[in-house]
């Protein structure tokens, strides 16, 4: 068994006495696409807050790196430092620069301490240009590279934002409910996109839509969070037929079908 890329061990986090995360243990392996599901308020977004340094755990370990002798203790780093290590997060609502073109949005996301002006007026080297061209194709926006981002459809904005994450060359992508508000067709394409990123990147995708979870989970692991801790983990079919899961989540019907 290889060493995990991300190790979360016995982590807890309370807000004013309310336990948002309780003794959570979770391992992500390199190249994996992990799906995290759970009812509203289960602690899914808080879990991302802890990984990205937006919130600090009250206790527990968060380590990043496949080489144990060189791994990084995320509890000691701030949000910026964690991002620079290669952990990128996509929030639920897209936040693209609406007045800039699709292409410029990607340029603005490149790694490096450039200001907006320098980014847009400094000539890109050919390596960066080729890489951004490749990203545009990956997120299927090459035909709309000159469009103002504000004019894109909701789904396209989400893809652009995934492209902006990719421009930073992250090792890990944390994606929070990407299919929310999407049409069925956009949801399908988003699933394909995320599946195409696995292997080269490692991903944790939080999702509610069970049809979408089924699509992206394929042979991968699904983690079910409930009341801030792991209720169950396994293949999609195992998780779906687990009586505990059915009771707290799938059995409610609301999220059981699309
Ligand atoms: P999910 O994403 O699974 O729907 P969240 O992680 O957003 O759940 O929230 C889990 C619980 O933790 C909720 O009850 C929420 O109100 C609480 N919580 C999360 N972040 C904060 C915060 N910054 N301050 C206070 N309470 C919070
Ligand atoms: Mg959430």
Image (cartoon, rainbow, N blue to C red):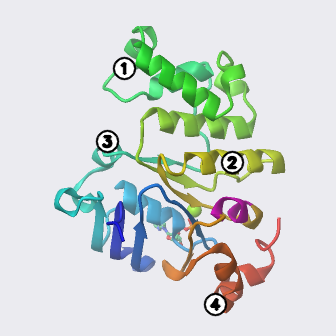
Mark number displayed over residue 244? 4
Viewer-nearest of labels 2 and 4?
2
Q: Secondary structure at mark 3?
A: helix
- Viewer-nearest residue: 125 or 43: 125
Q: Are marks 1 and 2 in contact (CB under 8 Å)?
A: no
Task: Measure the alpha-carbon separation of dots 2 and 4.
Answer: 30 Å
Q: Are marks 2 and 3 in contact (CB under 8 Å)?
A: no
Residue 8 % position (x, y): 35, 70
55 over 222 or under it: above or below = above
Task: Measure the alpha-carbon separation of dots 3 and 1.
Answer: 17 Å
First reached walking from the N terminus: tag 3 or tag 1: 3
Task: Measure the alpha-carbon separation of dots 2 and 3.
Answer: 27 Å
Residue 117 % position (x, y): 41, 13
Whether the residue under disc 4 has CB within 8 Å of ligand 1: no
Span of residues in magenta = 212-217
Residue that badge 3 annotates: 84
At 71% from the left and 85% from the top, the residue drawn is 241
Mark number displayed over residue 192? 2
At 82% from the left and 46% from the top, the residue drawn is 185
Q: Is residue 1 visible?
A: yes
Q: Secondary structure at mark 2?
A: helix
Q: Is residue 62 left or right of residue 176?
A: left
Q: Is residue 109 left or right of residue 238?
A: left
- Viewer-nearest residue: 80 or 32: 32
Decide whether residue 213 is among the magenta residues. Answer: yes
Residue that badge 1 annotates: 115
């Amino acid at each position: 068994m290889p060493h995990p890329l991300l190790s979360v061990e016995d982590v807890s986090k309370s807000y004013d006495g309310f336990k948002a995360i309780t003794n959570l243990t979770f391992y992500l392996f390199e190249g994996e696409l992990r799906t995290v599901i759970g009812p509203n308020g289960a602690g899914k977004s808080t879990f991302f807050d802890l990984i990205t340094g937006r919130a600090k755990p009250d206790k527990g370990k968060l380590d990043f790196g496949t080489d144990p002798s060189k791994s990084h203790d995320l509890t000691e780093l701030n949000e910026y430092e964690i991002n620079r290590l290669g952990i990128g997060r996509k929030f639920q609502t897209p936040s693209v620069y609406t007045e800039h073109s699709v292409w410029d949005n990607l340029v603005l996301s490149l790694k490096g301490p450039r200001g907006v002006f320098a980014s847009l007026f400094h000539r890109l080297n050919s390596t960066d240009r080729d890489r951004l061209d490749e990203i545009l194709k990956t997120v299927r926006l090459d035909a709309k590279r000159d469009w103002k981002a504000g004019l894109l459809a909701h789904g396209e904005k989400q893809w652009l934002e995934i492209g902006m994450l990719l421009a930073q060359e992250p090792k890990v992508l944390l994606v929070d409910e990407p299919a929310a508000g999407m049409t069925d067709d956009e949801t399908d394409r988003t699933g394909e996109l995320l599946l195409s990123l696995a292997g080269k990147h490692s991903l944790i995708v939080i999702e509610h839509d069970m049809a979408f979870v089924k699509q992206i989970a394929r042979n991968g692991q699904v983690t079910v969070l409930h009341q801030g801790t792991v209720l169950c983990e396994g293949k999609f079919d195992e998780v779906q037929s687990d009586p505990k899961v059915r009771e707290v989540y799938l059995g409610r019907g609301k999220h059981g079908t699309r």
